[in-house]
Amino acid sequence: MSCVLVAVNAKYIHSSASARTLAAYARAQNAPDFIVREFTINQSASAIAAVLYRMEPRVVFFSCYIWNIDVIRRTARILRKTIPGVAIVFGGPEVSYEYKHLLGEDADVIVIGEGERTFTRLLRHFTGSGTILSDIPGIALLDGGHVRVTLPVEPLALDELPFPYTDADMPALTHQIVYYESSRGCPFDCQYCLSSAEKGVRYRSLAFIETELAFFLRHKVKQVKLIDRTFNCDAVRALAICRFLTENDNGITNFHFEVAAELLDTPLIDLFRTARVGLFQLEIGVQSTNTPTLAAIHRHADFTKLSAVVRAIRETGRTHLHLDLIACLPREDYAAFAQSFNDVYALAPQKLQLGFLKLLRGSGLRRDAAQYGIIAEDSAPYEALATEALSHNDVLCLRDVENMLDLFYNAGHFERTLAALVQLYDSPFAFYEALAAFWTGQGYNRVAHNRAATYGYLRSFCASQRQTALPLVTDLLLYDMLSVDNASLSGWMAACEPDAAKARHFYDNAQAIAAVAPHLSKYPASRLHRMCRLVRFAHDPQNGEQRETHILFDYHAAYGVAAHDVTAWMEEC
């Protein structure tokens, strides 16, 4: 009979930091043997239960979050029916604040709060080498039909936690995001976040951090995502870590931090100016720019300062920026949210995430939902359906806008086209609102589409809304598309085929090829037309000026696709 620790991740590319941290601490404490298993929410409860059943577990520990609690509960109930006497333990943020409804049918024990010490003690209890269950701090259990909560567990100093990764782990993580924790807690009191339920921040020592980050660099991990709530709440520490990563950059690994932009100071921004392009990725939670909303959620960010910082980082062109908005926050109606959207869109992040409020168990807004007229789904992830300021119809419209934002803006494949189209509307939000109405009106929201088709749909939208802009938008769409894929020119794209004789003459012109793309000079002209694509535009895609322009798209450039203006060379043909 085995003890099994289970993590159910949101996607295959995610790995479980919680399971690895629990396991590393328990093993360092010489806890009884156990097995770690990871699944994803794309696997059914019956499939997960089948794997666990064949392991003949004595006790199963589940790490619970909003994205996996439903499948975990179903899995636990299957195990209860198929494995007589199995013990089920739930832990994690989803069950640490509200747990009475889970005890009995779903779980025998709930771990409340930080789990490393408690997990280790429970392993000893269930294998008969530890104290009685009711004496273990940091748990809830049923005792005589009543819920009993033991004394709180004492928080760990983070330096007590062993590094949760080994050399043997890394091959399996080659195509996954690796998560790392350098601090716990948050100095802020945002009422939509679980960090508001905890006070203070604990840090891991820099000596440990540098050694551990060097491990990821040595293994050339693709992305390391720090799960710190606010990475830069200690500016000196954040600068030291980023300087270490810059000085030891392996040219491959990307590091993702969640930061408070208003706390980013000049030394750190200056460091970003010198870092390799793609070394750092910053996620900044703006959430809203509406003053009454910010007051209601206890968020006191200075948007003017935040904007200046974001623009300074954006201007370096070296650091990926991911900005977040939350719809359905208190005191923000449809018009106010549209303004928040426009404010943040103007900062031109590489990614703008439009999320919807989730009434997390243990958060202040879950407690005060009635005060703000917030109604939400009963089951995880408890997303808001309406507020006193937003009708459900408003929320549905915002979800349509979210879909368009993700499909077009966040995809990163329509940069020039979107910039031109947005200028034709009163605001960025007005554009995405109109696009969403067109999209749903055409029924495109009911089926999946490949990327190639979406270029044509965006052109159709322009034709239906702004006919006079169609020639320019057609050119920009084609430019955006060919900047990503070497697509064949057919249908609405066929008009951009250059004169065949001139194209042959250009490819035969060794002087022209050497001038615009020297690395192609070694190839014969007969191969160049397959390695590149020569396109004629009615407008200059760089500035929108109406003049015939020829662009050579080079798909054998060292980094991505290179676009060369060869108009002057074509005029000689």
Image (cartoon, rainbow, N blue to C red):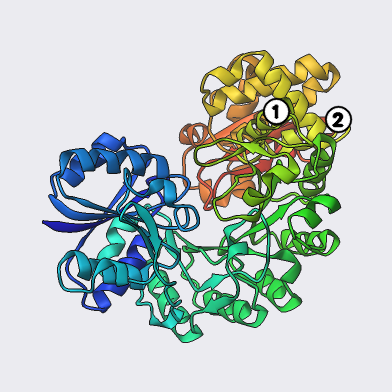
Which residue is nearer to you in this view: 58 or 68?
A: 58
Q: Which residue is mark 1?
A: 392
Q: Which residue is mark 2?
A: 425
Rendering quarter of residue 217: bottom left
Identify the residue at the far right of this view: 426
Which dot, 1 or 2, sits closer to the camera? 1
Query: Vertical placement of 438 versus 78: above or below?
Result: above
* Whole-percent x, y for residue 282 in the image: 62, 60
Give the total number of marks visible in the rendering. 2
Earlier-in-chain disc, 1 versus 2: 1
Query: Vertical placement of 388 versus 64: above or below?
Result: above
* Residue 41 in view in this figure: yes
Which residue is nearer to you in this view: 554 or 387?
A: 387
Q: Residue at x 54, y 78 (%)?
A: 202
Callout 2: SS: loop
Which amino acid, mark 2? Tyr
Q: Residue at x 72, y 25 (%)?
A: 393
* Whole-percent x, y for residue 188 in the image: 68, 67
Query: Vertical placement of 520 versus 97: above or below?
Result: above
Image quadrant in which the C terminus is located: top right
Distance Cα–Cα, label 1 vs label 2: 25 Å
Q: Residue at x 65, y 82 (%)?
A: 236
Q: Which mark is residue 541?
A: none
Which residue is nearer to you in this view: 457 or 507?
A: 457
